[in-house]
Image (cartoon, rainbow, N blue to C red):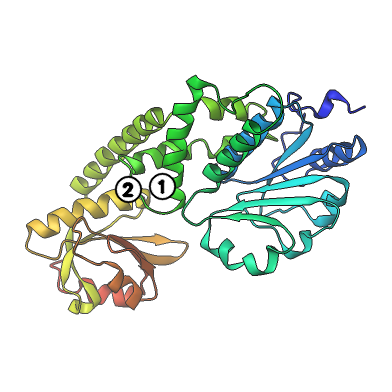
Amino acid sequence: MISRRYLPSYKLRFSAARSFRSDAALESISNALEEKVPNLVLYNYPSFSGAFSALFAHLYHSRLRLPSLILPFSSAVPFSVKDLSLEGFERCYLLDFIPPKNYATRDCEIICFDHRKSAALKLGSVKKRFKVNVDVDKSSSKAVYEYFSSKLASSEGESISLLDDEDRTRVESVLDYIEDIDLRRWRLPDIKAFSFGLKEWRSRVNCITNPHMYEQLLRISSEDLIANGSSYFSSRLIDAKRVLKQNKAFKIRLGRGFYGECLGMRADGNHELSDELGKLLSLQSAAAGLRPIGAVTFMQRNNLKMCLRSTDDTTDTSEVAKAYGGGGTCCSSSFIIRMDEYNEWTAKNPT
């Protein structure tokens, strides 16, 4: 008979250590094997798609009262094949990541979910050994949600839903926003505010150190995250305007003038506001008849870094960044610049 210790309702007791291969984590695997717990679930950490996928796995096994062990998987400190002893489990779910080749085993059914293009490139080496679900047009969390919802609906007995009616709309809205970020679309209303609001949850999506993770994820709403993110943006914009007022902007000859001129400033000590400062400078630069680009420069780890921002959709800042070994997007890019080169770009400014 399986002990209630590993029924889904049981909350594993771990030490506060963040190491994913902590003694407590390894002991939980050992105990699960000893008590013949059939289902192992590993979710990508610190991915929000991974965390919500873990939530859906937890709800599925809880609804059917199926024993399972759910653990975060960090590629920085991964569990080894020896740690997991996969042959001792009947089934292993890998949520939001594709496993290393050596995870193959004939005794354990391995089911993977991922949405990254890099994962799609690995399919040839793993699809013959695992059940792989990779869809580059759908986030892992949505795929896992649909998978366990369908699996639960097809189970024998009374009809059971993965989510209660009061939770479904709220959770599905959050999944839409996470997918918009995961697939790098950034199309939904207030998606950047949502992204900033979500960041404060990153430290909470470790079920080892946060035994209340599932309950907390169920309560997250996109409206609250957007409100928090918008408040955060507003406070940063106020700070950026204050810094810009206190520091004089000056002309930057991009590429010694090859890419035109724009307004820039040094932001040593305020580099965390580089995005907001760059956008404000972009507007001022355009108003001054220069290129609609803002250049924010500061010291970072003994290197001089220049960040370029533009609020104009037709302007490509990355052409400058790439020419100097950096990169980015049309509206946001950065690169490391030598001090002597930087001095050439600012040489004609009045002292």
Residue 210 visible from this viewpoint: no
| Gap in angstroms between the C-alphas marked 2 and 1 | 7 Å
Q: Is residue 344 above or below residue 219?
A: below
Q: Is residue 20 left or right of residue 342?
A: right
- Which residue is located at x 20 percent, y 55 percent? 311
Q: Is residue 17 left or right of residue 279?
A: right
Query: Which one is nearer the viewer's eye here, 83 or 65?
Result: 65
Residue 119: horizontal and vertical position, in percent? 58, 61
Q: Is residue 317 above or below residue 235?
A: below
- Mark 2 in CB contact with mark 1 (< 8 angstroms): yes
Check residue 180 in the rendering and tell me which mark sits there, or answer none. Answer: 1
At label 1, counting other C-alpha atoms closer than 10 Å, the crowd grade (few under 14, some 14-19, many 20 or more) is some
Residue 194: horizontal and vertical position, in percent? 38, 38
Residue 218: horizontal and vertical position, in percent? 54, 27
Q: Is residue 86 above or below residue 28?
A: below
Q: Which residue is mark 2?
A: 187
- Which residue is located at x 46 percent, y 54 percent? 137
At label 2, counting other C-alpha atoms closer than 10 Å, the crowd grade (few under 14, some 14-19, many 20 or more) is few
Query: Which one is nearer the viewer's eye here, 124 or 237?
Result: 124
